[in-house]
Amino acid sequence: MNSIEVRGATLSYDQKNPVLNGLDLTVQTGSIYGLIGPSGCGKTTLLSSILGMKQLDSGTIKVLGQKVVYEKSSKFSNMIGYMPQETALVPELTIKETLNYFGNIYQMNQILLKQRLIMICDLLELNDVNKQVNHLSGGGKRRVSFAAALIHDPKILILDEPTVGLDSILREKIWTFLIDSTKSSNMSVIITTHYIAEAERSNYCGLMINGVLLADDHPKNILAKFGVLNLEEAFLALCLSKKSKAEGCASNGVHFPNSASTFDGSNSIHADDSSNSTKINENIIVELDKRKTFSGQTFRALFKKEVIRIRRQPGEIFFTILFPLIKGILFIYTMGKNPKGLSIGVVNNEISDINYCSEYLKSTNYEFNNSSCNFENLSCYFLNEIRDDTAVKIGYNSFDEAYKSAKAARIYGFLSIASNFTEAITKRKSDWQALTDDVFLDQIDVYLDHENLQIASFLKLRLFKAFEKFNKKLLQQCDLNEKLEDSPMSIETFYGDFDSDYVKTLIPALFIQAILLSGILFSLSSIAQSRTGGVWNRTIIAGVTVSEIISVQFTLLFISDIVQLIVLKIITATLYDGEIVGNQWILGFFCLMVYMTGSSIGIFVSILTNNLLILNTAGMVIFFFGGSLCGGMWPIEGQPKFLQYLSVTIPTTLPTVTVKNIIAKGFDMSHETIYGGFALLGAYIATMLTLSFWSLKRTKFTEQH
């Protein structure tokens, strides 16, 4: 039985330039097939099609007598060893860890794995097995890649430029091993190479250009046909002959007789007979059914690989797990806090020298010393209520001077106190029924820089509070009820209190965004690392299933989420002074679902593309829109109607309300905002995972040409 049969293979990325053009190829069992040709002639595309990574436009491919179906070649995985053109290794793993990883995803017996590891490392001179792959030379990495293809003792070995970058002694050693293996274990090898002289050691040699095999025969027959001494001269003659043909690269160009009719059995590494073919076929039928669709051994290998990779990349841990938390903590300690050290000007027309006030207040011990409700220098008492932690008061001699300073942005605003301030205030308290218009000139004019709305609002509130406090003291001094200063409207709270920090209202939205972003970044980073550099394709070819990949990712995400939740729990409890009213188990489980939602979104996005720039941009866009529309910074009721409808569908708006209601209001699962939040996240997770499974089933492999 032939190991590989390709018949009429046609594939093109555009209609004008076919990569494979009606190609026929046969690799006999127990033989080495050398495929040579210039870069871009279609060699790698042909190998990708044999492995099920590319879908032919027309034609068929059979491996071990079984038809290859696009992206469904995992049934051959344990029987094929594949070494891609790139090294396709995990840089953070050591040589030993790499070979153990591939051995375990091939579901090898552990004793056999240890024996094969020792033998292959000795063959390829991989002496320091505890050395990390990213510390190896280019040739060293290719040797490890070759070792990974050999580790499970495959029946078919597909090698794409395996000897590039290796010295001649090691190349000779590898070829000797390949020849011995085809003799002893009936292994079949298809190898592409730029070293044309190497191909002379193959049983068959295919000379390929523009997707067509110009020759497909035993090397000695090719040399005899052209009467030359080496394949390089034969290949040159073929190219010149092909160039002279008007048909270009048509399949009826220069072609040698079918290898089955011209191949001399005496030149074969070992003769093929029908009884041996039948025996191999029976073994193959049994082995094709051996691999489990979900294997605990494969799961553990994938999980261990990810743990080692993450542990040896502290930068990834910081940016994907700790960075969102640190961002949240910094946000908490920088947002919503009262500003301090603000400069505000004072033009006191009642007392020309502002320094006089401090001396005068010291002399009165900062107390009103008059029981008859007749006062002096009341402006000093009012200014004393404006504490230095609210604003630093700077005196000015005139309105114009203060105004110029404010316009020059040296101060945030200034007060202008009327010259009859004390007189007018005293009349208000003593004989309020006989007030004349001049009494109402006692006002304090306040001028603020409203370009900085937060500071202007803060100063306005604090100035009102200072005057209210000042006025209540005056009422007491005049034996009047201080409640006269209060508004007739009484406002009470049933959740929260008037003195709550603004930051407490931001915490739920902030934590939802931080948890969601962590999940997105962690999954994007983890999968993107595997999908770049060929590791993903090599893992899928080895037979790893979609369910195993998704399960490992979710297990890692679950563990990282638990760590983050513990940190968030400590921060939240500290900020709320232990005043988390609701059930903390519900809160913890809900935060876990938020993280899983972010993870599922990240998994889906990273499956759509392996472009790191696009992935990072997508993560930031999701975070930006989630933070802007969730209603954490500003109520969604202030948004335009169409944005309100959009806001309630994103995975941050309703979850923010849910967390608020659990923490501050103590709502349980019976309330619509709680079970609604759980339902929304559950829908997101189910949708993203379904789309991820569907996308992986549809396009398992990353793009390669």
Image (tube, grey):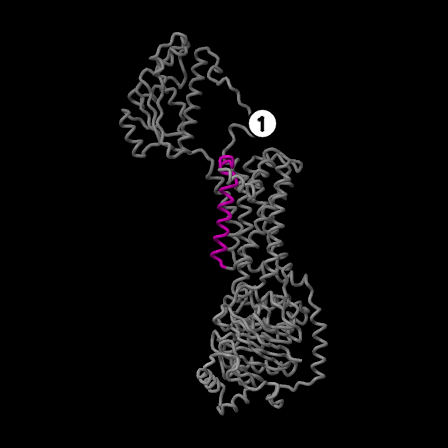
Residue 56 image offset from top left, x and y in percent: 57, 70
Badge 1 is on which residue?
494
> Looking at the picture, how far across and down is residue 539, in whole percent?
59, 65
Residue 170 visible within the image? no
Q: Is mark 1 on a helix, strand or loop?
A: loop
Name the foreground residue: 388 vs 191. Answer: 191
| Stretch in magenta | 611-639
Specify whether residue 678 is in view: yes
With respect to residue 580, does 474 lie above or below? above
For image coordinates 42% across by 15% down, the residue present is 474
Instruction: Say above or below: 184 vs 651.
Output: below
Q: Position of residue 204 (x, y in %)?
A: 57, 84
Instruction: Tell me the quarter of the image containing the N terminus.
Output: bottom right
Q: What secondary structure do most residues of the magenta stretch adopt?
A: helix
How many discs mark residues in the rendered view? Answer: 1
Where does the image place residue 131, in percent across and percent down from the top left?
Answer: 54, 67
Tell me the crowding category of disc 1: few under 14, some 14 to 19, or many 20 or more residues within 10 angstroms, Cα based: few
Q: Of 244 and 191, which appears nearest the observer?
A: 244
The part of the image, by quadrant, that contains residue 294 is: bottom right
Q: Which amino acid does label 1 sit on?
A: Phe
